[in-house]
Amino acid sequence: MKTTFRVVSILEGLSYLILLFIAVPIKYIGNDESWVKLFGMPHGLLFVAYVVLAYLIKAELNWNTKTFLIVLLASIIPFGTFYIDKKYLRN
C-alpha cells in the first residue's frame, strides 16, 4: 500500500505542476483552454486518490493527526508531495 501511495503522490505532484506551470499559463497567455481540460481531470482523480490513500495508510505508518494534516496540506502546495515522499515515505 505504501508503494501505491508513493506512486500516486508523485503522479499527483507532477500533474499539479503541469497544470499550474504549463496548462494555466497557456490558458491565459495563449487563450487555449485545451491543456487545462486535458490535465485537469487526471489531476483531480489523482488528488482524490492521494487523499483517500493517505487516509487508508495513516494507521499503517503510525501517523498522528498532525502528520496526517501535513500530508493532506502538502497536496495543495506545489512540490509538497515530493517533500512528503522524502520525509515520510522513503524508508
Image (cartoon, helix red, strand yellow):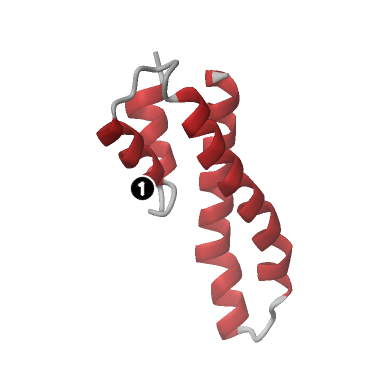
Q: 25 above or below 56?
A: below
Q: Residues within 10 Å of mark 1 (few under 14, many from 20)?
A: few
How many marks the image carries: the answer is 1
Element carrying mark 1: helix
Q: x, y percentage for residue 49?
A: 60, 40
In this view, the residue in front, 32 or 49, is: 49
Q: Is residue 41 above or below residue 80?
A: below
Residue at screen point 43% across, 41% down: 81
Displayed quadrant of residue 80: top left
Query: In the image, what residue occupies the spot 51% across and 55% down?
Result: 17
Residue tagged 1: 73
**Location of residue 15 in the rendering, given as x and y in whole percent from the top left corner:** 59, 51
Residue at 62 percent across and 55 percent down: it is 44
Residue type at mark 1? Leu
Residue positioned 74% across, 73% down in the render = 34
Which quadrant does the C terminus fall into?
top left
Q: Position of residue 31 (x, y in %)?
A: 65, 86
